[in-house]
Image: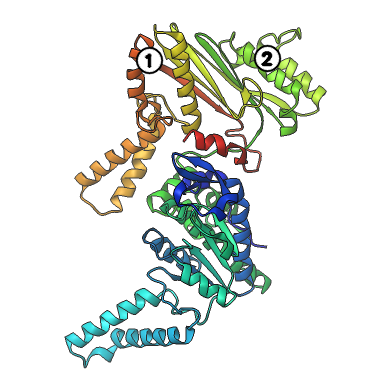
Amino acid sequence: MAALPDYNMRQLLEAGVHFGHQTHRWNPKMAPFIFGDRNGIHIMDLSKTVPMLHQALVAVKDVVASGGRVLFVGTKRQASEPIARHAGQCAQYFMNSRWLGGTLTNWQTISNSIKRLRELEEMLGGDGASGLTKKEILNLTRERDKLELALGGIKEMGGVPELMFVVDTNKEAIAIAEAKTLGIPVVAIVDSNCDPDSIDYPIPGNDDAARAIELYCGLVSKAVIAGIEESSSSAGIDLGAAEEPMSEITASMVKELRETSGAGMMDCKAALQECDGDMAAAVDWLRTKGLAKAAKKAGRVAADGLVGVSSEGTAGAVVEVNSETDFVARNETFQSMVGDIATVALGTDNHDGLLAADYPGAGKSVEAHVTEMVGTIGENMTVRRSEKLRVENGVVASYIHNQVVDGLGKIGVLVALESTGDTTKLEALGRQLAMHVAATNPLAATIDDLDPAETERERAVLVAEAKESGKPDEIIEKMVEGRLRKFYEEVVLTSQTFVIDGETRIEKLLQNAAGDVGGEVALKGFVRFELGAGVDKGEEADFAAEVAAAVSGS
């Protein structure tokens, strides 16, 4: 059975799916799908969007697998291009200019217009126009172009579709009404100002953001392809031929790149062949070709356990202790152990020193105590990593995201601020910065601290993207520098905009704080530990419990 496309809540958050309309424009029928509001904007409940999107994709795949056709409908400006492109990629049909009243309910008339379009294409494409004047050819060309714009996406459809996918139910109300009249099921994006009652498979989410629309269309297109593959497989057609290497590029490598980048199978194969099997280079290649919205970083993989922090004036430590299941992470004995290890880390200089240090009241080292606890609790546990920050004058502030008990949670952050000013005010500033770091996950404190390899890699990708535009070299250089500045604003802490006020750069925030705390404030460093980051457990993270904090911190 062909697999549905993979997606997770992180992708939805990054695409802005959770942003609704202004609260005064809402439809009360959408109340069950709204998490809350922020700054007068409704926030969609992504924990409900994820399963409803899955149901919709299953419906799309099942319709196509049974031989049905899907009509993509989206005539608003930001939806027009992705609707046409993704419908074309999966060999389906689309309406992306203007919905003509009666397109479905008066198919016979529409068929006559399509027939006229074909006649014009044949006439203007062959020798039929040889006996016409320039004015006649111009008029016929205009007529053809007008019909192509209106009907080009459905001229091969041959009849009404078996399912309709719609972006913006308010704008496409006539199309939905025609589908309901004919009993055609509708999959649609329903924003906070929409009526979900008339939709068979509603998907609560932002229907205005270009990135969100790109994500929806891509997932539906992949679900269609999965349906086609399933239909072909049941008919005895082997699309994959044999599981054999593709010029040193294996099928498993292609699958991994598809999951990472979201690009098509053949594009992933071409990227891997072009880059001699180098996965990271293949992701960059896809980005330069515009074939994937590849992430700048590998992403986050789920693992169980807890992150613990301990801070005391001018010093702070953070540790990550992993367990096999979340059940153990909720165990009071395990939680107490992680808290004790975080406290011990305050008095050590590095991770090896922490493992060798005495565990409080146990008469043995931290490492030996954890080994003993494995036998007691019955699960494998490891002190995976630890780090410590210290300043001469000032504070090391801490913050725990999704706190389970005091000092323990899923994300732990330390921020070191050097200053001779008021430590109470400095502590409050440091905690706010730690919350910012938890929300934005910067790669470095300053541009100088950023790994040169990371900068060069991004520059290479940006140069390749810019060269695709065909502009002169001097323009390309300016484009690259501008995009590189934007990259710094995304990944460098001091260049980022403070999430709490949404206006002030962190660098400026630190300068402004000098007057308040009574002394210059210098950012000496930060540490951010995210539970399970980089640990391969073969399953996706569940971000449903983090939506509230993600919204309040963004």
Asked if one can make out residue 55 in the rendered structure from this viewpoint, the answer is yes
Relative to residue 204, is residue 116 drawn left or right? left
Residue 416's disc is none
Q: Quadrant of residue 36?
A: top right
Relative to residue 512, is residue 94 drawn left or right? right
Q: Is residue 17 above or below residue 153?
A: above
- The disc, 2 or 1, on the residue closer to the chain's N-terminal end is 2
Q: Position of residue 483 (x, y in %)?
A: 31, 41
Q: Is residue 299 above or below residue 311?
A: below
Residue that numbered label 1 is attached to:
522
Q: Nearer the viewer, residue 317 or 13?
A: 13
Name the quadrant of the N terminus: bottom right
**Residue type of the residue flagged with mark 1:** Ala
Q: Position of residue 221 (x, y in %)?
A: 52, 62
Q: Is residue 457 above or below residue 308?
A: below
Which residue: 38% across, 50% down? 288
Mark 2 Cα within 10 Å, few/some/many (few <14, many 20+)? some
Q: Quadrant of residue 463?
A: top left
Q: Position of residue 6 (x, y in %)?
A: 58, 52
Q: Secondary structure at mark 2?
A: helix
Residue 340's disc is 2
Which residue: 47% across, 17% down? 428
Asked if one can make out residue 93 in the rendered structure from this viewpoint, the answer is no
Which residue: 68% across, 14% down? 340
Mark 1 Cα within 10 Å, few/some/many (few <14, many 20+)? some
